[in-house]
Image (spheres, grey):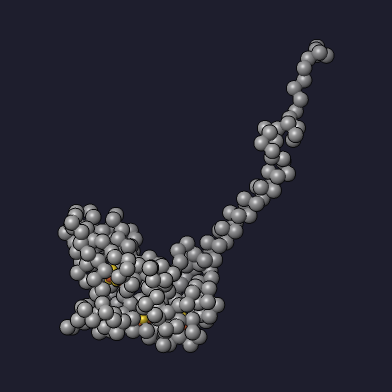
Amino acid sequence: MSNPEREVTPELSTEQSPANSLGITRRSMVVGGVGAATLLVFGGVVKATAGEIAPIRPPGIIDEEHFIATCIRCDRCRTACPTDIVVTCGLEDGIINIRTPRLDFYVGGKSYRRPEGLDQEAVIADPYPNLLAAAGTGFCNFCRLCIDNCPTGALQSFNPETQWIGEAVIDPYLCIAFEKLGGCEKCADYCPFEAITIDENRLPVVDPSKCNGCGVCVNICPSSTYRTYKGSKKRGINIESTGQVRPS
Ligand code: SF4
Ligand code: SF4
Ligand code: SF4
């Protein structure tokens, strides 16, 4: 028999719920949930549209927004490039970038070879014409053929005073010198701009004020051949985007 005096635990109403004690109503929770879901979807759309990592462009873009609006995906820059470093973006680079050009520092093929009688001081003082005689693939020699062949002005005159292709960054997990505490100085030996030094621990250090992102060091880095597996294209030194802005 039920006890008429039994206290009935009332159901928690919206007004009495713990959430409400924090000032949250059911309506605001629903709105918040929808908002969070929208943000997640929007974030996914932005990622799919723009890609996870900003592509590194050939030299001479004004800014990414102008570039995307002006590039007609004609492929002329890629076909003009003598070092095969210009490739076209695929779906993995984001929908908005499909068929636009990016630089691929891992194209392999022929290794960088210094021009005969390279005058190092002249290269550092005025680097752009001096790499033209360098043989190989997978680095930018600043020939500007991509710029000259661009019909729309998406690529424009490259100003080395204010623009960088990118910046070389050492990956301590892949660099042989970090693994063996010395024993490899190839990137420092080959950098045409003397942007890499070897420190007292026999490790390479990049000077961002000298590195223009040419990619010679990536091209010459033996870390991927040193390892027998090929898990990733990344090497002991890799180029990262600076948005073509020269770091000050
Ligand atoms: S400047 Fe020359 S080497 Fe560099 S990306 Fe353009 S075409 Fe290729
Ligand atoms: S040549 Fe110019 S317009 Fe054509 S794909 Fe290259 S950057 Fe775009
Ligand atoms: S990308 Fe490498 S080779 Fe080119 S300037 Fe920078 S450190 Fe030197």
- Where does the image place residue 158, in percent across and percent down from the top left? 40, 81
Closer to the camera in the image, 247 or 91: 247
As displayed, is residue 147 above or below residue 192?
Answer: below
- Report which quarter residue 28 is drawn in: top right
- Where does the image place residue 157, in percent across and percent down from the top left? 42, 84
Closer to the camera in the image, 98 or 208: 208
- Where does the image place residue 37, in percent across and percent down from the top left? 62, 51
Task: State how many labels appear.
Answer: 0
Does residue 219 appear left or right of residue 86 in this picture? Answer: left
Q: Who's the residue at 32% across and 62% down the image? A: 169
Closer to the camera in the image, 9 or 207: 207
Closer to the camera in the image, 118 or 221: 118
Q: Who's the residue at 26% across and 77% down the image? A: 124
Q: Quadrant of the N terminus?
A: top right
Does residue 112 appear left or right of residue 29 in this picture? Answer: left
Does residue 124 appear left or right of residue 8 in this picture? Answer: left
**Farthest-out residue, front:** 248
- Where does the image place residue 212, in percent across and percent down from the top left? 33, 72
Q: Who's the residue at 29% across and 77% down the image? A: 137
Q: Who's the residue at 24% across and 74% down the image? A: 192
- Report which quarter residue 79 is drawn in: bottom left
- Report which quarter residue 238 is drawn in: bottom left
Residue 119 visible in rendering: yes
Q: Quadrant of the C terminus?
A: bottom left
Residue 134 visible in rendering: no
